[in-house]
Structures are given as C-alpha cells and as structure tokens.
C-alpha cells in the first residue's frame, strides 16, 4: 500500500503483474526435495504438481535474502493474487496472500 492506496506492480524483468508460460519451472524446489520451514512445519507442498485442495499458512515470520531493491520499495504491506491456468485457459489454482515486509 502506497499512501493508503493499493497499487498494482507492473511486470518488469519477470517480476510483478506478469504472465508466465511455465510457473512451475520458476519454483526453486524440485520434486523429492524437502520443503523449507514454515511450509514443512505445516505440511504444505512446495513443488509441482500441487495436490488439489485448500491450503492455509498461519501467520508466520519468514526471512528473505537481500534482494538489492531499495528499502522504500521493500518496506510495506502487500497483497498477492496468483492464478494458474493451463494452455486451454482452464484455471488450475488460485493463491492469495497478504504480507508485510521490513528491511
């Protein structure tokens, strides 16, 4: 939220409001690898294909490596909505998250 207004982030260098051909290839975890906490703590999957069903991650604190982005861009409250479609344009999954970042 910037100045009390939610702002859509444009797609810049594959980050932001983007369309990807193969979202699964962007996930850094591979089938058979253990999922990191807090996903493993709550028995949540981290690799494709994701089993059908609802998932919930309780309020958690996660440390993210330094991205090199300016602090004014990283500090703030964010909402994320991700929708996954197949090539026939059938929606396969929907992911909603709300989170806060602090440097």
Image: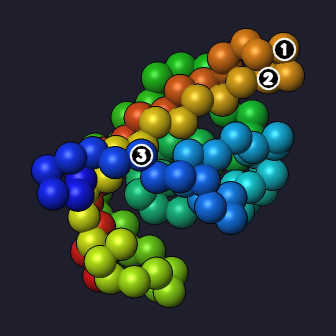
At 75% across and 43% down in the image, what residue appears? 20
- Disc number placed over residue 86 in the picture, else none: 2
Depicted 38 relative to depicted 97: above or below: below
The residue singled out by tag 3 in the image is 8
Question: Quadrant of residue 61 in the image?
Answer: bottom left
The residue singled out by tag 1 in the image is 88
Depicted 76 relative to depicted 32: above or below: below
Question: Quadrant of residue 70 in the image?
Answer: bottom left
Q: How many marks?
A: 3
Decide which of 72, 86 is in the foreground and name it.
72
CB contact under 8 Å: marks 1 and 2: yes
Callout 1: helix, strand or loop?
Answer: loop
At 54% across and 36% down in the image, what residue appears? 82
Depicted 54 relative to depicted 33: above or below: above
Residue sitting farthest toward the left: 4
Decide which of 100, 42 is in the foreground and name it.
100
Is 10 positioned to the left or the right of 3 in the image?
A: right
Q: Quadrant of the C terminus?
A: bottom left
Q: CA distance from mark 1 to mark 2?
A: 5 Å
Is 5 positioned to the left or the right of 43 in the image?
A: left
At 50% across and 86% down in the image, what residue appears? 68
Callout 2: helix, strand or loop?
Answer: loop
In the rendered image, residue 37, in percent from the top left (x then y), is placed at: 46, 62
């Amino acid at each position: 939220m910037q100045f009390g207004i939610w702002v859509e982030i444009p797609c810049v260098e594959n980050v932001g409001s983007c369309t990807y051909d193969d979202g699964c290839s962007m996930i850094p975890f591979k089938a058979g690898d253990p999922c990191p906490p807090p996903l493993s703590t709550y028995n949540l999957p981290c690799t494709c294909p994701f089993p059908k069903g609802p998932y919930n991650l309780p309020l958690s604190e996660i440390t993210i490596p330094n991205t090199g982005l300016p602090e004014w861009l990283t500090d703030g409250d964010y909402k994320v909505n991700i929708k996954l479609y197949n090539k026939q344009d059938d929606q396969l999954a929907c992911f909603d998250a709300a989170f806060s970042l602090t440097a």
